[in-house]
Amino acid sequence: MASSEIARDINRSSVLDSIRIGQPLSRADLARQTGLQRSTVSLIVDELIDERWVVEGALGQLPRGRRPRLLYLNTHRAGIIGINVMPRQTVIALADLNTRILAQESIATQLDPKIFIKVLCSYTQRMIEHHPEVAFEGIGVSVPGRLDYEAQRVEFAANLGWHRVDLKEPLERSTGLPVQIENAANACALAEVWSGAHEGVTDLIALTVSDGIGTGIIANGHLVRGPSGAAGEFGHVCLNPDGPECKCGGRGCWEVYASNVAAIRNYSGQKDNGTRTPEGKLSNGSGTSFADILSLAERGDRRAGRALDEMARYLGLGMAMLVNGLAPAVIVVVGEVTRVWKRVSPIIEQVVHECAHTHAATRIEPADDSKQPRLRGTIALVLQKHFRPRLFA
Ligand SMILES: [Zn+2]
Protein backbone atom coordinates (compact mmCIF):
# COMPACT_ATOMS: atom_id res chain seq x y z
CA MET A 1 0.00 0.00 0.00
CA ALA A 2 1.15 3.54 -0.70
CA SER A 3 2.05 5.48 2.42
CA SER A 4 -0.84 7.93 1.85
CA GLU A 5 -3.29 5.01 1.86
CA ILE A 6 -1.76 3.65 5.07
CA ALA A 7 -2.04 7.10 6.67
CA ARG A 8 -5.68 7.35 5.58
CA ASP A 9 -6.44 3.92 7.05
CA ILE A 10 -4.74 4.82 10.32
CA ASN A 11 -6.65 8.11 10.55
CA ARG A 12 -9.90 6.39 9.75
CA SER A 13 -9.48 3.67 12.36
CA SER A 14 -8.43 6.15 15.04
CA VAL A 15 -11.53 8.29 14.32
CA LEU A 16 -13.68 5.15 14.53
CA ASP A 17 -12.03 4.10 17.78
CA SER A 18 -12.44 7.56 19.33
CA ILE A 19 -16.17 7.38 18.58
CA ARG A 20 -16.35 3.87 20.07
CA ILE A 21 -14.71 4.91 23.34
CA GLY A 22 -16.17 8.41 23.73
CA GLN A 23 -19.56 8.32 21.97
CA PRO A 24 -21.48 10.46 21.43
CA LEU A 25 -18.95 12.91 19.98
CA SER A 26 -19.13 15.87 17.60
CA ARG A 27 -16.76 16.38 14.68
CA ALA A 28 -15.00 19.11 16.68
CA ASP A 29 -14.51 16.70 19.61
CA LEU A 30 -12.99 14.20 17.19
CA ALA A 31 -10.57 16.74 15.75
CA ARG A 32 -9.44 17.61 19.27
CA GLN A 33 -9.05 13.98 20.36
CA THR A 34 -7.28 12.66 17.27
CA GLY A 35 -5.21 15.75 16.53
CA LEU A 36 -6.44 15.65 12.92
CA GLN A 37 -7.60 18.68 10.94
CA ARG A 38 -11.32 19.46 11.01
CA SER A 39 -11.55 18.98 7.23
CA THR A 40 -9.86 15.57 7.42
CA VAL A 41 -12.21 14.50 10.22
CA SER A 42 -15.25 15.63 8.19
CA LEU A 43 -14.15 13.64 5.14
CA ILE A 44 -13.57 10.51 7.21
CA VAL A 45 -16.88 10.89 9.07
CA ASP A 46 -18.81 11.29 5.77
CA GLU A 47 -17.22 8.10 4.52
CA LEU A 48 -18.01 6.25 7.78
CA ILE A 49 -21.64 7.41 7.60
CA ASP A 50 -21.85 6.30 3.93
CA GLU A 51 -20.56 2.87 4.92
CA ARG A 52 -23.01 2.74 7.87
CA TRP A 53 -20.30 2.37 10.55
CA VAL A 54 -21.42 5.62 12.15
CA VAL A 55 -24.79 7.34 12.55
CA GLU A 56 -25.69 10.92 13.38
CA GLY A 57 -27.90 11.29 16.42
CA ALA A 58 -29.19 14.11 18.61
CA LEU A 59 -27.95 17.70 18.51
CA GLY A 60 -25.27 18.47 21.08
CA GLN A 61 -25.24 21.47 23.42
CA LEU A 62 -22.95 24.45 22.95
CA PRO A 63 -23.01 27.78 24.83
CA ARG A 64 -23.52 29.63 21.53
CA GLY A 65 -23.52 29.12 17.79
CA ARG A 66 -24.82 26.20 15.72
CA ARG A 67 -25.46 23.02 17.73
CA PRO A 68 -23.32 20.14 16.43
CA ARG A 69 -24.69 16.76 15.32
CA LEU A 70 -23.42 14.01 17.62
CA LEU A 71 -21.94 10.81 16.23
CA TYR A 72 -22.52 7.25 17.45
CA LEU A 73 -21.42 3.81 16.32
CA ASN A 74 -24.11 2.15 14.25
CA THR A 75 -24.62 -0.93 16.39
CA HIS A 76 -26.73 -2.50 13.61
CA ARG A 77 -23.83 -2.33 11.15
CA ALA A 78 -22.28 -5.65 12.08
CA GLY A 79 -22.58 -8.65 14.35
CA ILE A 80 -19.61 -10.58 15.65
CA ILE A 81 -19.55 -14.18 16.85
CA GLY A 82 -17.22 -14.76 19.79
CA ILE A 83 -16.22 -18.29 20.82
CA ASN A 84 -14.41 -18.85 24.10
CA VAL A 85 -13.09 -22.41 24.34
CA MET A 86 -12.30 -23.50 27.88
CA PRO A 87 -11.74 -26.93 29.42
CA ARG A 88 -15.22 -28.38 30.13
CA GLN A 89 -17.24 -25.49 28.68
CA THR A 90 -17.27 -23.43 25.49
CA VAL A 91 -19.30 -20.23 25.16
CA ILE A 92 -20.63 -19.03 21.80
CA ALA A 93 -21.94 -15.47 21.74
CA LEU A 94 -23.29 -12.86 19.35
CA ALA A 95 -22.22 -9.27 20.02
CA ASP A 96 -22.83 -5.90 18.37
CA LEU A 97 -20.26 -3.23 17.51
CA ASN A 98 -20.35 -1.94 21.09
CA THR A 99 -19.34 -5.47 22.24
CA ARG A 100 -22.78 -5.77 23.84
CA ILE A 101 -23.66 -9.48 24.08
CA LEU A 102 -27.00 -10.07 22.31
CA ALA A 103 -27.19 -13.85 22.58
CA GLN A 104 -25.13 -16.52 24.26
CA GLU A 105 -25.01 -20.32 24.46
CA SER A 106 -22.78 -22.84 26.21
CA ILE A 107 -21.75 -26.29 25.05
CA ALA A 108 -19.59 -28.96 26.66
CA THR A 109 -15.98 -28.91 25.45
CA GLN A 110 -15.40 -32.46 24.26
CA LEU A 111 -11.85 -33.69 24.58
CA ASP A 112 -12.12 -35.40 21.20
CA PRO A 113 -11.53 -32.45 18.86
CA LYS A 114 -13.33 -34.12 15.92
CA ILE A 115 -16.59 -34.48 17.86
CA PHE A 116 -16.18 -31.03 19.42
CA ILE A 117 -15.64 -29.27 16.09
CA LYS A 118 -18.77 -30.86 14.65
CA VAL A 119 -20.94 -29.73 17.57
CA LEU A 120 -19.31 -26.26 17.63
CA CYS A 121 -19.91 -25.71 13.91
CA SER A 122 -23.57 -26.73 14.14
CA TYR A 123 -24.24 -24.44 17.16
CA THR A 124 -22.46 -21.54 15.48
CA GLN A 125 -24.43 -22.06 12.27
CA ARG A 126 -27.64 -22.14 14.28
CA MET A 127 -26.83 -18.87 16.04
CA ILE A 128 -26.21 -17.23 12.66
CA GLU A 129 -29.47 -18.63 11.23
CA HIS A 130 -31.46 -17.39 14.24
CA HIS A 131 -30.37 -13.80 13.52
CA PRO A 132 -31.11 -13.20 9.84
CA GLU A 133 -31.27 -9.43 10.45
CA VAL A 134 -27.57 -9.26 11.40
CA ALA A 135 -24.77 -8.62 8.90
CA PHE A 136 -22.02 -10.82 10.31
CA GLU A 137 -18.49 -9.42 10.27
CA GLY A 138 -16.59 -12.49 11.43
CA ILE A 139 -15.83 -15.00 14.16
CA GLY A 140 -13.22 -14.63 16.93
CA VAL A 141 -12.06 -17.73 18.80
CA SER A 142 -9.93 -17.92 21.93
CA VAL A 143 -8.26 -21.16 22.99
CA PRO A 144 -6.26 -21.95 26.14
CA GLY A 145 -3.17 -23.19 24.36
CA ARG A 146 -0.26 -22.47 22.08
CA LEU A 147 -1.05 -21.51 18.51
CA ASP A 148 0.80 -21.88 15.26
CA TYR A 149 -0.04 -18.45 13.86
CA GLU A 150 1.23 -19.22 10.37
CA ALA A 151 -0.90 -22.34 10.02
CA GLN A 152 -3.64 -20.67 12.14
CA ARG A 153 -4.22 -23.78 14.20
CA VAL A 154 -3.92 -24.89 17.82
CA GLU A 155 -0.46 -26.39 18.22
CA PHE A 156 -0.82 -27.70 21.76
CA ALA A 157 -3.43 -27.19 24.48
CA ALA A 158 -2.26 -29.08 27.58
CA ASN A 159 -5.51 -28.70 29.52
CA LEU A 160 -7.58 -29.95 26.58
CA GLY A 161 -5.13 -32.63 25.50
CA TRP A 162 -5.20 -31.22 21.95
CA HIS A 163 -2.32 -31.45 19.49
CA ARG A 164 -2.46 -29.71 16.11
CA VAL A 165 -6.15 -28.99 15.94
CA ASP A 166 -7.59 -26.87 13.13
CA LEU A 167 -10.71 -24.98 14.25
CA LYS A 168 -10.45 -22.21 11.66
CA GLU A 169 -10.97 -24.14 8.45
CA PRO A 170 -14.08 -26.12 9.50
CA LEU A 171 -15.67 -23.02 11.08
CA GLU A 172 -14.99 -20.94 7.96
CA ARG A 173 -16.31 -23.69 5.72
CA SER A 174 -19.54 -24.19 7.67
CA THR A 175 -20.35 -20.49 8.20
CA GLY A 176 -18.73 -18.71 5.25
CA LEU A 177 -17.30 -16.12 7.68
CA PRO A 178 -13.65 -15.21 8.31
CA VAL A 179 -12.29 -16.68 11.56
CA GLN A 180 -9.60 -15.13 13.80
CA ILE A 181 -8.06 -17.44 16.35
CA GLU A 182 -5.95 -16.39 19.34
CA ASN A 183 -4.46 -17.70 22.55
CA ALA A 184 -6.87 -16.97 25.45
CA ALA A 185 -4.46 -14.84 27.48
CA ASN A 186 -3.52 -12.79 24.40
CA ALA A 187 -7.23 -12.25 23.66
CA CYS A 188 -7.70 -11.07 27.27
CA ALA A 189 -4.80 -8.62 26.93
CA LEU A 190 -6.45 -7.32 23.77
CA ALA A 191 -9.81 -7.03 25.59
CA GLU A 192 -8.14 -4.88 28.27
CA VAL A 193 -6.67 -2.55 25.66
CA TRP A 194 -10.01 -2.53 23.88
CA SER A 195 -11.92 -1.57 27.05
CA GLY A 196 -10.23 1.85 27.03
CA ALA A 197 -9.67 1.52 30.81
CA HIS A 198 -5.86 1.82 30.62
CA GLU A 199 -5.29 5.23 29.04
CA GLY A 200 -1.59 5.91 28.51
CA VAL A 201 -0.51 2.36 29.42
CA THR A 202 1.78 0.69 26.86
CA ASP A 203 2.94 -2.25 29.00
CA LEU A 204 0.30 -4.58 30.34
CA ILE A 205 -0.03 -8.26 31.20
CA ALA A 206 -3.31 -10.18 31.27
CA LEU A 207 -2.92 -13.14 33.59
CA THR A 208 -5.54 -15.83 33.01
CA VAL A 209 -6.06 -18.16 35.95
CA SER A 210 -8.23 -21.21 35.34
CA ASP A 211 -7.27 -24.89 34.96
CA GLY A 212 -3.92 -23.54 33.80
CA ILE A 213 -2.17 -20.17 33.87
CA GLY A 214 -1.61 -18.01 30.81
CA THR A 215 -0.04 -14.60 30.25
CA GLY A 216 -0.88 -12.23 27.42
CA ILE A 217 1.93 -9.69 27.26
CA ILE A 218 1.74 -6.24 25.72
CA ALA A 219 5.14 -4.54 25.76
CA ASN A 220 5.78 -1.10 24.26
CA GLY A 221 2.27 -1.21 22.78
CA HIS A 222 2.75 -4.54 20.98
CA LEU A 223 1.49 -8.04 21.70
CA VAL A 224 4.50 -10.27 22.38
CA ARG A 225 4.27 -13.61 20.57
CA GLY A 226 7.86 -14.47 19.77
CA PRO A 227 8.95 -15.80 16.34
CA SER A 228 7.28 -19.18 16.96
CA GLY A 229 4.14 -17.75 18.57
CA ALA A 230 4.92 -19.53 21.83
CA ALA A 231 5.76 -16.50 23.99
CA GLY A 232 3.90 -15.91 27.24
CA GLU A 233 3.99 -19.46 28.63
CA PHE A 234 4.96 -18.29 32.11
CA GLY A 235 2.52 -20.87 33.50
CA HIS A 236 5.09 -23.50 32.56
CA VAL A 237 8.11 -21.86 34.12
CA CYS A 238 9.47 -24.42 36.59
CA LEU A 239 9.37 -23.34 40.23
CA ASN A 240 10.39 -26.74 41.59
CA PRO A 241 12.03 -29.48 39.48
CA ASP A 242 10.98 -32.05 42.11
CA GLY A 243 7.38 -30.81 42.17
CA PRO A 244 4.24 -32.58 40.92
CA GLU A 245 3.94 -33.50 37.24
CA CYS A 246 2.44 -30.93 34.90
CA LYS A 247 0.31 -31.69 31.83
CA CYS A 248 3.00 -30.07 29.65
CA GLY A 249 5.37 -32.94 30.47
CA GLY A 250 7.45 -30.94 32.95
CA ARG A 251 7.40 -30.85 36.73
CA GLY A 252 6.64 -28.20 39.32
CA CYS A 253 5.47 -25.55 36.81
CA TRP A 254 3.96 -22.32 38.17
CA GLU A 255 0.45 -23.45 37.14
CA VAL A 256 0.81 -26.70 39.08
CA TYR A 257 0.87 -24.53 42.24
CA ALA A 258 -1.25 -21.49 41.38
CA SER A 259 -4.11 -22.61 39.11
CA ASN A 260 -7.69 -23.52 40.07
CA VAL A 261 -6.68 -27.18 39.77
CA ALA A 262 -3.92 -26.55 42.33
CA ALA A 263 -6.48 -25.19 44.80
CA ILE A 264 -8.73 -28.22 44.21
CA ARG A 265 -5.79 -30.57 44.74
CA ASN A 266 -4.77 -28.71 47.84
CA TYR A 267 -8.32 -28.78 49.23
CA SER A 268 -8.72 -32.50 48.65
CA GLY A 269 -5.24 -33.29 49.96
CA GLN A 270 -4.20 -34.96 46.70
CA LYS A 271 -0.60 -35.28 45.57
CA ASP A 272 -1.07 -35.59 41.81
CA ASN A 273 -2.30 -32.93 39.41
CA GLY A 274 -5.80 -34.35 38.80
CA THR A 275 -6.88 -36.46 35.85
CA ARG A 276 -9.60 -35.90 33.37
CA THR A 277 -12.54 -38.12 32.46
CA PRO A 278 -13.39 -38.47 28.74
CA GLU A 279 -16.21 -35.91 29.25
CA GLY A 280 -13.64 -33.39 30.40
CA LYS A 281 -14.69 -33.34 34.05
CA LEU A 282 -11.85 -32.90 36.44
CA SER A 283 -11.70 -36.02 38.51
CA ASN A 284 -10.04 -35.32 41.82
CA GLY A 285 -11.63 -38.01 43.93
CA SER A 286 -13.80 -35.56 45.85
CA GLY A 287 -15.78 -34.17 42.90
CA THR A 288 -15.21 -30.67 44.31
CA SER A 289 -15.07 -27.88 41.73
CA PHE A 290 -13.21 -24.59 42.07
CA ALA A 291 -16.57 -22.80 42.31
CA ASP A 292 -17.39 -25.06 45.30
CA ILE A 293 -14.13 -24.03 46.99
CA LEU A 294 -14.95 -20.34 46.43
CA SER A 295 -18.41 -20.71 48.01
CA LEU A 296 -17.10 -22.87 50.85
CA ALA A 297 -14.44 -20.28 51.68
CA GLU A 298 -17.01 -17.49 51.56
CA ARG A 299 -19.13 -19.44 54.05
CA GLY A 300 -16.12 -19.67 56.38
CA ASP A 301 -14.83 -23.19 55.59
CA ARG A 302 -11.24 -23.20 56.93
CA ARG A 303 -9.86 -25.88 54.60
CA ALA A 304 -11.23 -24.13 51.49
CA GLY A 305 -9.86 -20.82 52.79
CA ARG A 306 -6.41 -22.32 53.30
CA ALA A 307 -6.43 -23.78 49.76
CA LEU A 308 -7.19 -20.31 48.34
CA ASP A 309 -4.55 -18.63 50.53
CA GLU A 310 -1.96 -21.13 49.29
CA MET A 311 -3.02 -20.49 45.68
CA ALA A 312 -2.71 -16.73 46.31
CA ARG A 313 0.82 -17.13 47.68
CA TYR A 314 1.89 -18.95 44.52
CA LEU A 315 0.07 -16.46 42.31
CA GLY A 316 2.09 -13.75 44.08
CA LEU A 317 5.34 -15.66 43.61
CA GLY A 318 4.81 -15.94 39.85
CA MET A 319 3.63 -12.35 39.58
CA ALA A 320 6.82 -11.21 41.32
CA MET A 321 8.66 -12.96 38.46
CA LEU A 322 6.57 -10.99 35.92
CA VAL A 323 7.19 -7.73 37.79
CA ASN A 324 10.93 -8.38 38.04
CA GLY A 325 11.25 -9.52 34.45
CA LEU A 326 8.91 -7.25 32.53
CA ALA A 327 7.90 -4.44 34.93
CA PRO A 328 4.52 -3.81 33.29
CA ALA A 329 2.38 -0.86 34.39
CA VAL A 330 -0.53 -3.21 35.09
CA ILE A 331 -1.16 -6.93 35.61
CA VAL A 332 -4.85 -7.68 35.09
CA VAL A 333 -5.96 -10.96 36.65
CA VAL A 334 -8.72 -12.80 34.75
CA GLY A 335 -10.56 -15.74 36.26
CA GLU A 336 -13.00 -16.98 38.89
CA VAL A 337 -10.43 -16.33 41.63
CA THR A 338 -11.15 -12.59 41.26
CA ARG A 339 -14.53 -13.28 42.94
CA VAL A 340 -12.62 -13.59 46.24
CA TRP A 341 -10.25 -10.71 45.44
CA LYS A 342 -10.63 -9.18 48.92
CA ARG A 343 -9.24 -12.38 50.39
CA VAL A 344 -6.45 -13.16 47.90
CA SER A 345 -5.29 -9.66 46.95
CA PRO A 346 -3.50 -8.79 50.25
CA ILE A 347 -1.60 -12.12 50.11
CA ILE A 348 -0.61 -11.56 46.45
CA GLU A 349 0.48 -7.96 47.17
CA GLN A 350 2.49 -9.07 50.23
CA VAL A 351 4.39 -11.80 48.32
CA VAL A 352 5.08 -9.49 45.35
CA HIS A 353 6.32 -6.84 47.80
CA GLU A 354 8.66 -9.37 49.45
CA CYS A 355 9.98 -10.91 46.21
CA ALA A 356 10.18 -8.00 43.76
CA HIS A 357 12.75 -5.40 44.72
CA THR A 358 12.91 -3.50 41.45
CA HIS A 359 10.49 -0.68 42.41
CA ALA A 360 8.63 -1.43 39.21
CA ALA A 361 5.39 0.07 40.62
CA THR A 362 3.20 -2.50 38.85
CA ARG A 363 -0.51 -2.26 39.68
CA ILE A 364 -2.27 -5.60 40.16
CA GLU A 365 -5.97 -5.43 39.31
CA PRO A 366 -8.81 -7.91 38.93
CA ALA A 367 -10.78 -8.01 35.67
CA ASP A 368 -14.53 -7.93 36.24
CA ASP A 369 -15.43 -11.61 35.90
CA SER A 370 -19.13 -10.77 35.41
CA LYS A 371 -18.24 -8.90 32.20
CA GLN A 372 -16.82 -12.10 30.65
CA PRO A 373 -13.38 -10.71 29.76
CA ARG A 374 -12.34 -13.84 27.85
CA LEU A 375 -15.38 -13.59 25.60
CA ARG A 376 -14.91 -9.86 25.03
CA GLY A 377 -11.38 -10.59 23.82
CA THR A 378 -12.76 -12.82 21.05
CA ILE A 379 -14.99 -9.99 19.82
CA ALA A 380 -12.12 -7.50 19.89
CA LEU A 381 -10.14 -9.97 17.75
CA VAL A 382 -12.59 -9.48 14.89
CA LEU A 383 -13.09 -5.73 15.31
CA GLN A 384 -9.46 -4.75 15.70
CA LYS A 385 -8.91 -4.51 11.95
CA HIS A 386 -11.41 -1.62 11.74
CA PHE A 387 -10.67 0.13 15.04
CA ARG A 388 -7.28 1.22 16.22
CA PRO A 389 -7.02 1.43 20.00
CA ARG A 390 -4.85 4.41 20.97
CA LEU A 391 -2.37 2.08 22.69
CA PHE A 392 -1.46 0.62 19.30
CA ALA A 393 -1.35 3.99 17.54
ZN1 LIG B 1 3.92 -27.22 32.75
Image (cartoon, grey):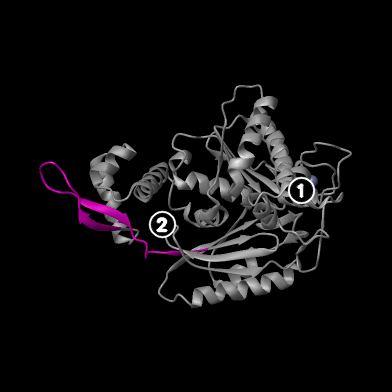
Location of residue 174 in the rendering, given as x and y in whole percent from the top left corner = 59, 74
For the residues labelled 2 and 1, the Cα–Cα distance comes to: 36 Å
Whether residue 186 appears in this view of the structure is no
- Assign a secondary structure to mark 1: helix
**Start and end of the magenta stretch?**
55-81
Q: Which mark is residue 373?
A: none
- List the single residue furthest toward the left: 65
Location of residue 221 in the rendering, given as x and y in whole percent from the top left corner = 52, 37
Residue wearing tag 2: 98
Instruction: Identify which residue, 272 or 347, lies in the foreground.
Output: 347
Residue 346 located within the stretch drawn in magenta: no
- Assign a secondary structure to mark 2: loop
Question: Which residue type does callout 2 highlight?
Answer: Asn
Label 1 near ligand 1 (CB < 8 Å): no
Residue wearing tag 1: 262
Location of residue 16 in the rendering, given as x and y in whole percent from the top left corner = 36, 50
Label 1: how many residues lie within 10 Å, few (<14), some (14-19) or many (20+)? Answer: many
Figure check: 11 above or below 143: above
Figure check: 359 above or below 386: above
Location of residue 94 in the rendering, given as x and y in whole percent from the top left corner = 49, 66
Whether residue 262 appears in this view of the structure is yes
Question: Which residue type does callout 1 highlight?
Answer: Ala
Instruction: Please give the count of numbered marks on the rendered protein.
Output: 2
Label 2: how many residues lie within 10 Å, few (<14), some (14-19) or many (20+)? Answer: some
Quadrant containing the C terminus in the rendered view: top left
